């Protein structure tokens, strides 16, 4: 799974993403490798709700879990042969050059 992180203040619209040659090239590479297994772009952190349970009490707060410049902007779930292939694909993601892309295996 590729966890896409970026600075929310510089987040492009869906239309800007669709028109960006860097995103088009990334999408073409993902499709060449077999496509995504899933993924989604997330709404801004202002729309987040954090839920914790402590001593049996459910605590709900508005906003994200952590205060940070980077925010989780979305996820891509892709099939890769190994970690090296996942890293190579993550390096092609446009946000890798302005934010970061965390590569994390999923449980099978």
Image: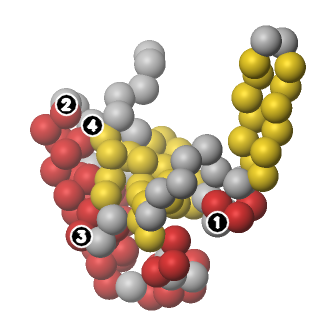
Element under disc 1: loop
Q: Residue furthest top?
A: 55
For label 3, the SS is helix
| Disc marking residue 44 | 1
At x 19%, y 33%, the residue is 83
Establish if 83 lies above or below 62: above
Percent of width and height locating residue 40: 57, 55
**Mark before the other along the chain sequence, 3 or 4:** 4
Closer to the camera: disc 2 or disc 3?
3
Instruction: Report crowding for label 1: few under 14, some 14 to 19, many 20 or more residues within 10 A (C-alpha).
Output: some
Q: Earlier in the sequence, mark 3 or mark 1?
A: 1
Residue at the image position 64 percent from the left and 65 percent from the top: 44
Q: Position of residue 19 (x, y in %)?
A: 45, 87
Q: Which mark is residue 80?
A: 4
For the residue pair 59 and 21, the one nearer the viewer reads as 59
Could you tell which of marks 1 and 2 lies nearer the N-terminus? 1
Residue 107, disc: none
Residue under numbered circle 3 = 97
Mark identifier at residue 82:
2
**Distance between mark 3 and mark 4 Cα atoms:** 21 Å
């Amino acid at each position: 799974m590729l966890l896409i992180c970026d600075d929310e203040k510089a987040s492009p619209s869906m239309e800007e993403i669709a028109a960006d040659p860097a995103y088009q090239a990334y999408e073409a590479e993902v499709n060449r490798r077999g496509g995504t297994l899933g993924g989604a772009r997330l709404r801004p952190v202002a729309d987040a709700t954090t839920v914790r349970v402590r001593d049996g009490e459910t605590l709900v707060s508005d906003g994200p879990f952590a205060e940070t410049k980077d925010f989780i902007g979305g996820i891509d779930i892709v099939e890769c042969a190994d970690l090296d292939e996942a890293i190579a694909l993550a390096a092609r993601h446009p946000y890798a050059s302005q934010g970061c892309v965390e590569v994390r295996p999923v449980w099978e």
